[in-house]
Image (cartoon, coloured by chain):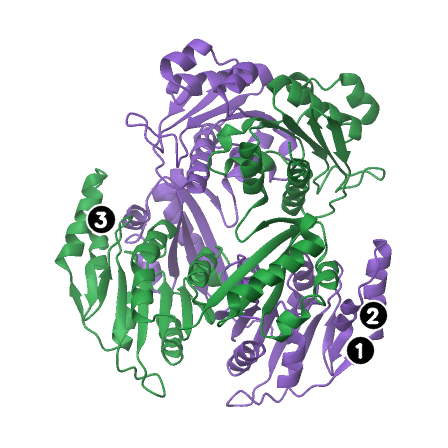
Chain colours: A green, B purple
């Protein structure tokens, strides 16, 4: 079975936006056992869209397009695909009523241009849009003129806004796919997420022990992010589940201490889960990370049960007034020092009453470096009942990577303490 | 001229990572006047890579591939492309020396597998990697067997890690492109970023007045993000600069109050610039946004000159102890109320001495809603010398969109005050 994804949008080709649809749709499909074979992005121009769709129809059983169904003049996907397939468009009164009611419910006038969204190619299934105006459309191309063997294809058009596309995929496209193109072979995908070991070193530790499994068809992949490396197993066929389970067992036995989670686990989620399970609380005192860690923790639903406060003490005055860092310590050691990190964490813990407090001070750059404390210098302190731990990694990266990596290191420090048990 | 981008990586097809290369490379190229015609992503499998490269060679003058040059077993791009083009691989001693010195400088042993990165297809230009081990490679395919007219193509392979790829593109690929495929036609792209008007309403206000320009060839595009809509003009040829300037003038005259920036401007950057220019300081008291706003502000280099502190007061106790919110106010009105937002902002301003303080309290969801205060309820207060303003938008979205939109609304509130002048 062949699946392809076509993302349309000149803003993609001009690099104005990130293509979040690719990741989200590929991920949803993979979780259902359908792996996308190819993803293509083209501009909102008639020829580019037509050519990409025609090529995909020549290869794929199921094609999803995103974007170009809205009301503005650059929304031309619906029209071009109808023209390519020789389907006439008709106005669907139920969609007109939906669009009218959408605006009425929000007490907003309905712009005349939005009515074009009710045009439907003959024979198309309409995918209702619960969160916007443009419906999705699904076409069964039964005698496919672009495929050498004339095999049929499904062509599904989804609207561009993520909060419209996502529920439409989950509630309408996924069931359609499973009904029309049921899977025959087993597919298992499992990802272990590690932090603290480089990609090559990880491979050196695990590749040979996994060799008999990979030789017999298990796919092994590595993906390095800043500070973290994912190890991914993909198994097909009858032994898939057992082979993937055995591969994961081997990796845990060899490098389990570096594995912080699986699949989509984010470090912040793992930590909120650990803290919740152990009924412990956390507070944060951030300088150079500027709220990055608080933001990550509070992205996790339920974080309010464990995070008491996050204090972004950028200025020295704020470090003194909100955390009780001593003027003398700042003067003697400088704001970026082990002593200040320690006082930040301990002051934060004392003033919030949290079980754990993390203090972070460093130089994110690009400015602010000095010969004895270059950009990337960093101190992370973890204050807890058992005392305070300080680590001193050096993160010489751009500002955003610096924040990301520092957050990962700070949370990993706490994760290992919590993993050791209460 | 035709440009194509090929991203390889099974993690892309499985939806494990976002394809940030697409946006970054397309953006860099567009800024140089080169618009990518097509972007394709395929898995790390030999056939998929070979087919995608072969097709691109059949169409494009300049092709960039990303990924698959590293040391692990799934890094096969270099080998497959060499095989496709019938080029032998040889070991380059300069690269071996670079890889050895890379590990030596970091006091880390060199894994044997990394040596494969020194293999170079015959005739390739080596693009040095200042930030990692795998070099990039540029091949001139002078008699191109895949192009009907035999026209030559350039094929450039870049390593996957962004901090290796980006400087390599800027310092080595961009100059190569400009030298080998100089531009003949003028190209101007300009984007105005607006907040507060829906896409259809924006189009209703500006499309007709821009009609004579678009009729004469100016491209007009819209791109809606959460809470913001970009208006993009692209002009080609001799009148491009004048037409784009005139189009922007028209948009500013009609909806200028909604325009917060241009091009890559982020709201946080605009605000840090305004505050810096007016020598004003800011402090933040965040509850439901959990540090999102602090993080955005501190992503801007130089933010330390204007941001005094950000207090993420998630618990009621933290609101009281760090901001001086009264227990009585919390008891009478609840934590999510206009009164608490006001006390948060005013308390934050008083305790930090900042010129402006923003207080945000709301229900991000998915839990925590109630019939009289459903998920999405929100109060944003801006405290300043002239008094305190409070707005009460309703952001009924997922947790991350809620934070993003709330941040935009909070900063827009301050932007308009600052835009009115000191």
| Crowding at mark 1 (Cα within 10 Å: few <14, some 14-19, many 20+) | some
| Crowding at mark 2 (Cα within 10 Å: few <14, some 14-19, many 20+) | some
Asked if residue A203 is positioned above or below residue A388 in the image, the reply reads below
In the figure, residue A361 lies in which quadrant?
A: top right
Disc 1: which residue: B91
Foreground disc of the pair 2, 3:
2
Q: Secondary structure at mark 3?
A: loop
Q: Name the side, left or right, on which B182 lies relative to B319.
A: right
Tell me, yes or no, whether the two marked residues, 1 and 3, touch with CB atoms within 8 Å. no
Q: Secondary structure at mark 1?
A: strand
| Crowding at mark 3 (Cα within 10 Å: few <14, some 14-19, many 20+) | some
Disc 3: which residue: A111
Disc 1 versus disc 2: distance between alpha carbons?
Answer: 8 Å
Location of residue A159 in the rendering, given as x and y in whole percent from the top left corner: 33, 58
Q: Chain of mark 2?
A: B
Badge 2 and badge 3 both on one subunit:
no
Q: Chain of mark 1?
A: B
Which of the two labelled residues, at mark 1 and mark 2, occupies the earlier sequence position? 1
Location of residue B369 in the rendering, given as x and y in whole percent from the top left corner: 35, 30
In the figure, residue A295 lies in which quadrant?
A: top right
The structure residue drawn at horizontal position 15% and vertical position 62%, both measured from the top left corner, is A91
A137 or B366, which is in the foreground? Answer: B366
Q: Quadrant of the C terminus of chain A?
A: top right
The structure residue drawn at horizontal position 43% and vertical position 26%, both measured from the top left corner, is B361
Tell me, yes or no, whether the two marked residues, 1 and 2, touch with CB atoms within 8 Å. yes
Disc 2: which residue: B96
């Amino acid at each position: 079975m062949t699946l392809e994804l076509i993302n349309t949008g000149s803003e993609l080709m001009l690099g104005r936006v990130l293509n979040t649809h690719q990741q989200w749709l590929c991920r949803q499909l993979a979780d259902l056992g359908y792996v996308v074979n190819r993803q293509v992005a083209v501009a909102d121009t008639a020829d580019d869209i037509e050519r990409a769709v025609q090529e995909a129809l020549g290869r794929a059983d199921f094609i999803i397009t995103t974007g170009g169904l809205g009301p503005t003049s650059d929304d031309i996907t619906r029209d071009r695909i109808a023209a390519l397939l020789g389907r006439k468009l008709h106005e669907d009164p139920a969609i007109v009523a939906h669009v009218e009611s959408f605006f009425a419910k929000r007490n907003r006038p309905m712009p005349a241009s939005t009515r074009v969204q009710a045009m439907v190619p003959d024979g198309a299934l309409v995918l209702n849009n619960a969160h916007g105006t443009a419906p999705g459309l699904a076409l069964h191309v039964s005698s496919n003129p672009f495929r050498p063997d004339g095999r049929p294809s499904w062509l599904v058009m989804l609207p561009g806004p993520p909060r419209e596309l996502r529920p439409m995929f989950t509630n309408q496209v996924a069931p359609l796919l499973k009904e029309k193109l049921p899977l025959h072979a087993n597919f298992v995908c499992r990802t272990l997420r590690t932090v603290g070991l480089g990609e090559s070193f990880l491979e050196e530790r695990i590749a040979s022990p996994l060799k008999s499994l990979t030789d017999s068809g298990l796919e092994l992949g590595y993906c390095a992010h800043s500070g973290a490396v994912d190890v991914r197993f993909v198994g097909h066929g009858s032994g898939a589940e057992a082979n993937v389970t055995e591969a994961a067992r081997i990796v845990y036995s060899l490098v389990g201490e570096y594995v912080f989670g699986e699949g989509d686990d984010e470090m912040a989620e793992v930590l909120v889960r650990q803290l919740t399970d152990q009924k412990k609380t956390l507070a944060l005192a951030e300088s150079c990370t500027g709220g990055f860690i608080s933001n990550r923790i509070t992205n996790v639903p339920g974080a309010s049960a464990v995070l008491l406060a996050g204090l972004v003490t950028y200025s020295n005055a704020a470090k003194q007034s909100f955390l009780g860092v001593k003027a003398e310590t700042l003067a003697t050691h400088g704001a970026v020092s082990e002593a200040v990190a320690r006082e930040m964490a301990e002051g934060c813990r004392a003033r919030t009453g949290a079980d754990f407090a993390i203090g972070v001070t460093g130089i994110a750059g690009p400015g602010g470096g000095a010969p004895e404390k270059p950009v990337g210098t960093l101190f992370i302190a973890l204050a807890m009942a058992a005392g305070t731990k300080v680590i001193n990694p050096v993160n010489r990266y751009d500002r955003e990577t610096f924040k990301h990596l520092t957050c990962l290191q700070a949370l990993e420090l706490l994760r290992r303490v919590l993993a050791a048990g209460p």
